[in-house]
Image (cartoon, coloured by chain):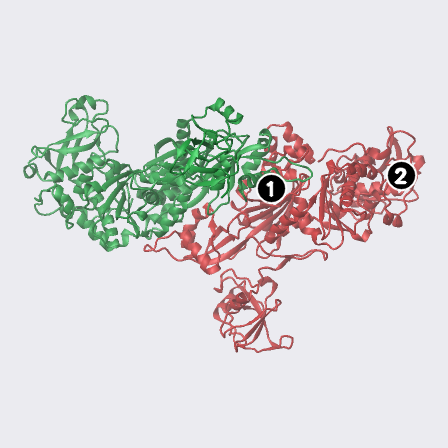
Chain colours: A red, B green
Amino acid sequence: MSDDPLVIFTPSGKRGRFPVGTPVLTAARKLGVDLDSVCGGRGICSKCQITPSYGEFSKHGVTVEADALSEWNKVEARYDDKRGLKQGRRLGCQATVLKDVIIDVPAESQVHKQVVRKRAEVRDITLNPSTRLYYVDVQEPDMHDPSGDLERLHTALSQQWKLDDVQADLHILQIMQPILRKGNWKVTVAIHLGDSENKPRIMHIWPGFYDGTIYGVAVDLGSTTIAAHLCDLQTGDVIASSGVMNPQIRFGEDLMSRVSYSMMNDQGAEEMTLAVREGMCGLFTQLAAEAGIDKQLIVDAVFVCNPVMHHLFLGIDPFELGQAPFALATSNAMRLRADDLDLNIHQSARVYILPCIAGHVGADAAAVALSESPQTSDDLVLIVDVGTNAEILLGNREKVLACSSPTGPAFEGAQISSGQRAAPGAIERVEIDPVTKLPRFKVIGSDLWSTEEGFDAAIAQTGVTGICGSGIIEMVAEMRMHGIVDAPGLIGTAEQTGSTAVFADGRTNSYMVYDGTENGGPLITVTNRDIREIQMAKAALYSGARLLMDKFGVDKVDRVVLAGAFGAHISTKHAMVLGMIPDAPLDKVTSAGNAAGTGARIALLNSDARAEIEEIVRNIHKIETAIEPRFQEHFVNASAIPNAVEPFPILNSIVTLPTQTFNTGGGGEGGGGGRRRRRG
Amino acid sequence: MSDDPLVIFTPSGKRGRFPVGTPVLTAARKLGVDLDSVCGGRGICSKCQITPSYGEFSKHGVTVEADALSEWNKVEARYDDKRGLKQGRRLGCQATVLKDVIIDVPAESQVHKQVVRKRAEVRDITLNPSTRLYYVDVQEPDMHDPSGDLERLHTALSQQWKLDDVQADLHILQIMQPILRKGNWKVTVAIHLGDSENKPRIMHIWPGFYDGTIYGVAVDLGSTTIAAHLCDLQTGDVIASSGVMNPQIRFGEDLMSRVSYSMMNDQGAEEMTLAVREGMCGLFTQLAAEAGIDKQLIVDAVFVCNPVMHHLFLGIDPFELGQAPFALATSNAMRLRADDLDLNIHQSARVYILPCIAGHVGADAAAVALSESPQTSDDLVLIVDVGTNAEILLGNREKVLACSSPTGPAFEGAQISSGQRAAPGAIERVEIDPVTKLPRFKVIGSDLWSTEEGFDAAIAQTGVTGICGSGIIEMVAEMRMHGIVDAPGLIGTAEQTGSTAVFADGRTNSYMVYDGTENGGPLITVTNRDIREIQMAKAALYSGARLLMDKFGVDKVDRVVLAGAFGAHISTKHAMVLGMIPDAPLDKVTSAGNAAGTGARIALLNSDARAEIEEIVRNIHKIETAIEPRFQEHFVNASAIPNAVEPFPILNSIVTLPTQTFNTGGGGEGGGGGRRRRRG
C-alpha cells in the first residue's frame, strides 16, 4: 500500500491515495467525484469550493490534522477578498493534499446537484444541463503553422476539456475573432453538449472569464395558457415563472375550433402559428424582464404541449388531427433551433419538444409521464391531466397505457351558463345546507363563506362574477348529494327537492346560486343544461380511465393523481361524487400540480431525461378511445351521477347519495350519453 | 457449382449465378453492380435500363441465347409506348434472368458515372452526389398503432432503401402531410445522404413518382467575377453556366481595398456581405432562368473563394486577414444551409465551402488542388492560379507546398495606363517587328492582325479600346525581346532602341502602340510606369514559386500548370520571357482553365471528394511569404526581366534576349523591388 495521503470525499464516499501536493480538484477528477469547475482549475471561477473536515473520523479510520491541506494561498486570499469565501471553504483547485484528509463537496459545488424537489413518491431529479460553460486558453495564431482561430479554439477544448468534435454555429464565427483578442486568447464558451441528432456545438463566446450564467426555459404551451419557468442552467434554480394567455384563443376557445379555423380559412394555420409564436416571444420578454436578465442568455428551451398546439407551434397545419385516424405529422421528439421557430431568445438556442404519445395524447402527457413516472410505480396509478382534453395514463412497472378523452371546456367553466375562468370573483367552493337546501359559497379572493359576516365587504372589489371549474364540480356534486339533482342528472322541482332555490326555467328547472341583480351584478344559477355539460365532460373523463382499466384487466386502481392546475383546486370527494374518477380511497387521490410543467423543467435541467422520456413514450401503449366500442358503453354508464352501473363502494362508505329520481317520463334519461362531443 | 444461370455484367465484369426468374436489377444489387433505380424496382423510373448482349462470348465462356431474359412485359411496353425505350434496351427491374446472360449497364444507367471529363493527366471524376431521389411506399396511419407520418416515412426508407436514421427539416414536416395523401402514400423524397457533420436528411418531398431531377450549383466566387455551373445531380451534366460581376467591386477593386473598406466603415463588412449574397442570388436566378428550371430544385451548392471573399460571404469581418498573422476565423470546410446565407435556392439546400489552406491561400486554391491533384503527380508540378492574388502550389506524391503572392491587379489590366479587362476591343496579342521595331496586335473579337487588310472594318464595332492582361504580358515581353525595354525594365530612347514608336514621356520614355485619336479613339501606349507595374506583379508571382522551390529543395520543376481564366489566354513563351514562371520546357507549361471552378464542380458532383480535399488540405505545407526573408531576395532578383540572377537555360535556348541596358545613371535599377505591394 502506498504511503501517499488518503483523500476521502463526502458525501460520495469515494476515496483514493494521491501524491503530496495534488490539488483537491485533480484528486476529485481522478476519482470521478462530482466537483464543478468552469475555469478548469485556474482559480478564477470558484465553482470548485470544498470544505475539509478536521479531527478524528473513526467511521473512515482517519484522523485529519490541521495541516492536512496546503496553506491558504494568494489566489484564495484574492478571491476571498473580492467575493468572500464561506467559513471553512477552500478552492479545490488551489488547496493541495499534504496528509490524509476528508473533503466535503457542498451541494453548490456539484455539477449534478439535486434540483427538482418533488413529492416523496417520485424520485429526485439531478441537474445535468444540455449546455455548459467552459473557460479555455486558446493558442495564438502563428504564420508558420496557419490555422483558423476556430480550429485553435477546438484544439483548446479538446486538450483542456476533452471536448472533441465540437462544432460552431455560423454566428459564432461571425463574432469570435474580436472576442478572442479582447480576452487575450482566453475565452469562456457555452457549449451545447450534443444529443442523439447533434454533435456538441459552441453556442456563445465571451472574452476572458464569463462571470455570469446561462439560462433555459421550460414551457408548458397549453390551449389556454402558456406558462414558463426561467431556470439558471448552472444551479437549476427557477429564476422567474410567468404565464400569458395563448393568443390563439381569438381563433377559438378549444382545440377543435382552432382546427376548424385552419380548415375554414386560408392561411388560418399560419395566422395561429404566428400568434402563438408571438405570444411565446412576449412571454420570454416578460420572464427576462422579471428576472432582470438578457434574453440572449437563454440558450435552451423545452416545450410541452398537446398535439394541436404542437403542430401549430411548429407551423404544421393541424388538419389531420381533426379527423380519424388523427395522424400526427411526427410523433418523435423534436430538436430544433430557436430561429427555426422565430423565437426571440439566443438565436441558436436549442429547442427540445417532448415526443407526442399519439394523435390526441401529446407532449404534455409525455411530460406528465416524465414527472410522475408511472412506469416505475409499484402500485397501479391512474394519472389524469384535466384540461379541455383529458390525458389519461394508467400503469405501473409492468406497463403503461395512455389515452385522451374529449372532456370539452366545461371543467374550465366554459359552456356553463354562469361559468367563467378561475379568477377573482369566481365561485370556487360550494356547500348546500342539508336542511334548507340553500347554497353557500366562497369566491376566489376571499376566505369567507358567502353566509359569513363581512363577506360582502370582502368581495366588494370583485363582486361575485360566476362559477369556475372547480366551483361547478362542487356545485353539481353538492346538488347530487342533497337531492337537488338525481342520478340521471335531472334537477327536481322546488317541491320535489324541498329547496326554494330551485325554480322552473322553461321546460326544466334551475338552481339559484346568487342573485346580484339588485346591485347590478349577475344572476348566477345552475341550469339543467349546465348539469348535462358537466355530465358529458365527466363521463368522457371517466370512460377514458375505465377503458384503460379494461385494457389493463383491472377494475380498480391503487391511487389517482390529478395533474394540471385544475387538479390542484378540485375537491376529491366532490369529484368522486360526480363519478369523474374511479372509486378510490380519498387519501389516495392526490394532486400533482402542473405535472406537465414539471416534466418540461425536468427535461430542461437534465438532458438525460430527454432520452428517458423518448424511451418511456415508445413503451406506452396507446389506446384510441374513438375506435373502442366499450368507450361508448362506459360513456353512457358514466353519464349518470356518479355512474349507472359501477358500484363505487369506497365512495358509498363515505357519502350516502339520495336515490330518488325526478324523471316524470320523457327527456333527460342518460344525460346526453348519446351526444358524443367532438374532440377539442 | 449451381445450375442457376450465370449473369455477367459489363463493363464491371462482375458475375454471379441467380435462380431463374431473378430480375436483372436484383442480380445487379446482389453483386454490387452500379445500376441506378429511383423507384426501387417498381417499373416507374426507368433508370435501370440495361442492354443484354446476345451470341457467343468466348472471352466470358458464355453463349447468350435469344431467350436468356424473360419476354418484354407490359410495364416495359407501357414505358416504351409513353417514353420510348432505345433499341435493345430492357428495364432491369422487369427483365428476369432465364439463362446465362451478359448484361451491359450503359453509362446513363450507372449512378456513379464518369462525369467531369478532364485533361489526360488528371484522373476522371465519378458522379456521387450528396443528394439523391428515392421513391417510397409509406404505410397509412393506423389508429391502433398511432405513429407520426414522418415516422412511417422513416420506416419505409429504412425497409425499402436501407436508409436509417434519416432526419427531416422542419419545413418537410410543414408540407409533408398533404403530399403523402395526394400521392396516395407513395412519394419521392430527395435525401441529403449526410456527411461528417450531419445525418442523412429529407430535403424535399413530391407526391407519387417525381419524374424530374434535382440540381446543384458549383460556384467560383472570385474577387471580380462570380461564376457558376448549374448541374443535374442525377446525370452530372452541366445544364447552364453563367457569371456576374462581383457587386463588391464598388467597395474596392482588389481584396485589400475591400478589407480597408470594412476597417474604415462601420457596417462596411455587412454591406459587402449583403452585396455578394445579393449578387449570388441574382446569379442563381439567371442560371435557373437560362436552364428553365425552378430555383427551388437546387438542393446542393459548393463554393470556392479566396479567404477574404470566404469571410465576407459568410458574414465574417475580414479585419484579421488584413494584417499579420492573417488569422482566418476558420480554415476548415464549412457545411451550412442555404438559409444560413440568405440564398434564394431551396431553403435547406446544403452549402459546402471548401477548406482554406491558409490566411492567404483560400478555398479556391484548395479547389485547384482538388482539380489538379498535385498530391498524386509523379513529376513535380507547379500550379499557379493567377488572379489579383496568385495562389501557388508545388508538389508531387511526396508532398505539396502552397503559398500566395500579392501580384496585384496588373495582370488583369488594372493599374496599367492603357489597361482594361478582357473584353471586345482589348489588345490581347502583340508582335513587334524585329526590323522596324513597330508593334502589330490583335484585339478581342477579331482574328486579324492590326497590319492585315480588313482589320479596321473588322474592329469597327468595338474600336481598339485598351490592352488586357494577356496583351500587356505579350507587349512587355516583346518589348524586352526586341530591345525596347532592357533587363532592369527601362524603356530606351528612340535612338537607343531604334524604334520610332518610342517617345520621350516626361522623365522616362513610352512606347506607342496605337493612336486612335484621329477618329476620337484612345492613344494606347506603354509607359515605363506600366513596365514597373508588370515587373512587380511578375516578380511577386515568380518569387512565390521560387520560394516554394527552395522549401522543396529543388531549382527546377517538371511542369507548370497555369490555372484561371487568365492562364488560358497567356502565351507561355512570353510569360517565360517576362520571368513570371520558372524556366521549363514550353510544352510542359499547360493551361488548366478555370481549375478552381472545376474543383468546385468535382466537390459538387462527388461528395467523397469533399473528405478528399479536406485530407489534401490538411497535408499541404503552408508557406507564408510575408515572413520569409528569401521572398524579398527572390522578389528583387525577379524584378529584372526575366531575372537578375536565375539563368533560365531553357528559355535562352529558344530566345536570345538583348543584353544592352539603357540606364544612364540614377533611377530605374531593380525595377521597384523595394516597393513591396500590399496584399490584395
Snapshot quadrant of residue A530: top right
Q: CA distance from mark 2 to mark 1?
A: 45 Å
Q: Is any atom of residue A390 visible in this view?
A: no
Does B308 sit left or right of B152 as displayed? Answer: left
> Given the image, what chain letter belongs to the residue carrying mark 2?
A
Looking at the picture, how far across and down is residue B597, in whole percent?
Answer: 34, 38
Q: Are marks 2 and 1 on the same chain?
A: yes
Q: Which residue is mark 2?
A: A484
Q: Which residue is mark 1?
A: A280
* Mark 2 and mark 1 residues within 8 Å of each other at the beta carbon: no
Q: Residue at x 57, y 56 (%)?
A: A234
Looking at the picture, how far across and down is residue A542, in whole percent?
Answer: 79, 42
Mark 1 neighbour class, 10 Å CA radius: few under 14, some 14 to 19, many 20 or more: many
In the rendered view of the protein, which quadrant contains the N terminus of chain A? bottom right
Snapshot quadrant of residue B185: top right
For badge 2, the amino acid type reads: Ile
For badge 1, the amino acid type reads: Met
> Given the image, what chain letter belongs to the residue carrying mark 1?
A
Q: Is any atom of residue A303 visible in this view?
A: yes
Front-most of residues B655 and A287: B655
Does B314 sit left or right of A226 as displayed? Answer: left
Q: Secondary structure at mark 2?
A: loop
Q: Residue at x 50, y 26 (%)?
A: B72
State how many labels appear.
Answer: 2
Work out whether B158 lies above or below B283.
Answer: below
